[in-house]
Image (cartoon, rainbow, N blue to C red):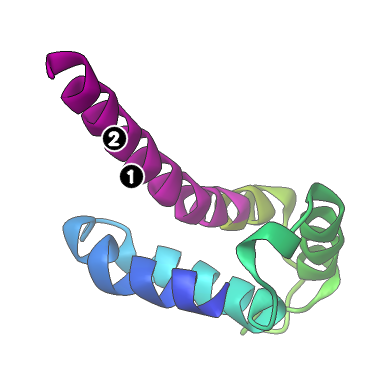
Amino acid sequence: MGRAIDRYIETVLPKKPKNAHNVKQHLLWWKKQLKPLTLDAIKPSLIAEKRDLLLVEPNSQGKKRCSTTAVRYLSSLSHVFTIPLISFQMEMIKLWLFLVMR
């Protein structure tokens, strides 16, 4: 998971300059929580557990995070999972077109 997050930060975030700083902060938190795991080992129950941890952990100013912040963190992580799916789907479409055009 750590590699997937690093790759996202290197390749996708530069194309999103508007909120890249915040998204990077979110993803570095997720990386710390999920780094040793592979993508297929991450289950919804684990994400929920980590989200709950995020809500009770104090932020950099020592304050409790609100649910809106947790949603933003989840949204950042969600996009990391979406990018490989889109790439895989595009490769499958290319393969299908190649086979059909033969």
Q: Is label 2 in a helix, a strand or a loop?
A: helix
Q: Is residue 94 above or below residue 68?
A: above
| Residue 44: x %, y % from top left | 79, 48
Q: Magenta region, mostly helix, strand or loop?
A: helix
Q: Residue furthest front?
A: 102
The C terminus: image quadrant: top left
Circles 1 and 2: CB atoms closer than 8 Å: yes
Name the residue rendered at 52%, 51% in the picture: 81
- The residue pinned by badge 2 equals 90
Q: Is residue 71 above or below residue 8?
A: above
Please indicate whether residue 24 sits to the left or right of residue 26 in the image: left
Q: Which residues are magenta?
A: 74-102
Q: Quadrant of the N terminus?
A: bottom right
Query: Is residue 92 a member of the stretch shown in magenta?
Result: yes
Residue in the foreground of this view, choosing between 77 and 21 = 77
- The numbered mark at residue 59 is none
x%, y% of residue 58? 76, 79
In the image, residue 89 lies in the stretch drawn in magenta: yes
Read off the residue under disc 1.
87
Residue 96, quarter of picture: top left
Is 47 on the left-hand or right-hand side of 70? right
- Mark 2 residue type: Met
User: In this image, 69 relative to 52: left or right?
Assistant: left
Residue at 68% x, 55% y is 70
